[in-house]
Amino acid sequence: MRLLERKTCIVTGAAGSLGLATARLFLAEGARVMLVDRRAADLESAAATLSAEGDVASAVADVTRAADVAGFVADTVARFGRIDVLFSNAGIFGTVAPIADYPEDVFDAVYQVHVKGAFLCCKYAVPQMNDGGSIVIACSVAGTRGDPGVHGYITAKHAQIGLMRCLAKELAPRRIRVNTIHPGPLDNGFQAAVEASLGAIIGRDATQFFDEQIPLGRHGRPEEIAMSVLHLASDRSSFTTGAMLMADGGMSV
């Protein structure tokens, strides 16, 4: 029996590298997957790629808009039935700047996507979830530390942990488990953009800078993180809730 056989799963941020890798793994484990992203062209490409690998549907949506979230939840239930797994993965980075220069609109945007987005996904998905389901919120090693100038992203990632802990206790009577996954720097376009801007600020190769902070000495691969998400999504983690799963190569040690 595959780990997610006939389970209905939602993946937000599905057109990004981690969302795509996780959706692919969910499909390989027998799931039916609703792919959600606000980038229509990228989502269409992801859905076309994955359609040969399993039962997928897609919805263009902005997770900061309640109507969009309610819409893709309703579409998921109409297409596949009640929800078993929610992987709340949509995210943006923002910028790096001293507090006096950090743009208020950027702070608001980052917080909206990571925190309000995760909140809305849970708000609308939970009533449609089967008992015994799983919610995984994509957090970050940034949720365990502070770094100068990363005000929006780090604040939002800490807030996601608070949301996860509230939900873990609230949903325990229904045996719905809620956990966060905490990747370190990944070898993907998201991190490459972060490192390009950070490198200009610190005056050195930011990729090497991060690798020096990771005990395993390298960036992670999206496929590696997807395996950890699968663990939290499946019954292999049936007694795990309210947990922060570090998948950061030891960066937080």
Image (cartoon, grey):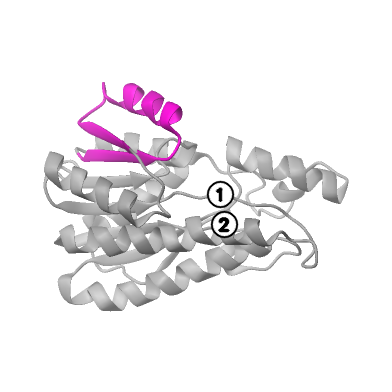
Residue labelled with disc 1: 92
Secondary-structure class at tag 2: helix
Does residue 124 appear left or right of residue 139 in this picture? left
Q: Position of residue 82 (x, y in %)?
A: 13, 52
Residue labelled with disc 2: 110
Q: Position of residue 65 (x, y in %)?
A: 39, 54
What segment carries the magenta color? 31-59
Q: CA distance from mark 1 to mark 2?
A: 6 Å
Q: Position of residue 125 (x, y in %)?
A: 24, 58
On screen, residue 85 above or below 53: below
What type is the residue that disc 2 sits on?
Val
The quadrant where residue 61 appears: top left
Placement of the C terminus among the 4 image quadrants:
bottom right
Secondary-structure class at tag 1: loop
The quadrant where residue 43 appears: top left
Which callout, 1 or 2, points at the residue further toward the start of the chain?
1
Q: Is residue 39 magenta?
A: yes
Answer yes or no: is residue 234 visible.
yes
Q: In the image, which disc is placed on residue 51?
A: none
Q: Residues within 10 Å of mark 1 (few under 14, many from 20)?
A: some
Q: Are marks 1 and 2 in contact (CB under 8 Å)?
A: yes
Q: Position of residue 164 (x, y in %)?
A: 39, 69
- For the point 24% across and 73% down, the residue is 171
